Amino acid sequence: MTTVYFVRHAQPNYDNHDDLTRELTEKGLQDRLKVVEALKDIPVHAVLSSPYKRAIDTVQPLADRLGLPVDTEADFRERKVGDGWLEDFTSFAKGQWADFDFALEHGESLRQVQQRNVAALERALKETYAGKTVAIGSHGTALSTLVEYYAPGFGYEGFDRIRNVMPWVVRFTFAGTACLEVKEMEL
C-alpha cells in the first residue's frame, strides 16, 4: 500500500505574475502550518514538490519537521495557461473543464496537465516510493485533474469549490498503481 498526500499550496501573492517564483502571502506562510498539524501523526517517508516556489514553501515546514529534503519533480508543476496574465480566469477555467483538450496558444490543456501529473505519480509509485507514505506539494488545477482522473466526476464544480481553499490536502491510497481511495482532508 502506498499513500500519497497531495498538498495544494497555501495562499500565493497574486501581485507576482511570475508563476515559477510566486511566493506565499503572510496568511499563506501561517496557513502552511496547518499541513504540518494535519500530518503530524502520519509517518511520511518523503516530501516531493512541484518546482514552483509557493508549492515548495508550503511543504517545507513539514519536511523540516521530519528532517527530510523537499525533492522537486518538474512534472508536478501547475498548468501553463499561455503567454501573459489571464484577466478572465473563470471563463477560461470553465472552457478548459468543458473541453479537456482546450488550450491557449503556448499553454497546456487540462488533459496535458493530467497526463503529465499522472505519469510523474505513477513513476513514483513504481519506483522509489512504492509501499511508502509521501507528501507532494502541488497546485489547484494540477491536483484537481488528478482527482478527476482517479475519482471521475470532480469536474469544474469540484474545481470551483476548492478554488479558494489553500492549502488543500487530498489523500490517495494505492495498491501498486491502482487507486483504492481519494479522500479530501480537513485542515
Image (cartoon, rainbow, N blue to C red):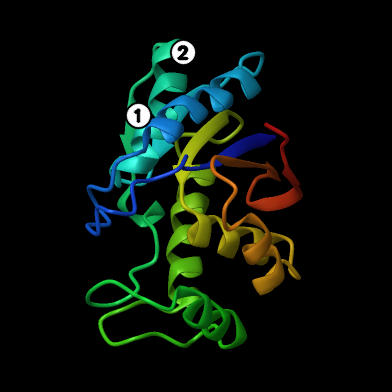
> Quarter holding the N terminus?
top right
Give the amino acid at mark 2: Leu
Measured as percent of width and height from the top left, residue 103 is found at 40, 85
- 139 relative to 65, above or below: below
> Quarter holding the C terminus?
top right
The circle drawn on residue 70 is 1
Give the amino acid at mark 1: Val
Q: Looking at the image, which is closer to me, 55 or 5?
A: 55
Q: Looking at the image, which is closer to me, 14 or 109?
A: 14
Measured as percent of width and height from the top left, residue 49 is found at 39, 40
Does the rendering let one see residue 12?
A: yes
Does the rendering let one see residue 118?
A: no
The residue sitting at 68% across, 60% down in the picture is: 161
- Residue 54 placement: quadrant: top left
Q: Could you classify mark 2 by the number of other residues whose Cα lies within 10 Å: few (under 14), some (14-19), or many (20 or more)?
A: some
Tell me the residue that label 2 is attached to: 66
Q: Secondary structure at mark 2?
A: helix
In the picture provided, is 81 more to the left or to the right than 115? left
- Residue 154 placement: quadrant: bottom right
Measured as percent of width and height from the top left, residue 104 is found at 34, 86
In the picture provided, is 186 more to the left or to the right than 127? right
The residue sitting at 22% across, 57% down in the picture is: 18
Q: CA distance from mark 2 to mark 1?
A: 11 Å
The residue sitting at 28% across, 71% down in the picture is: 85
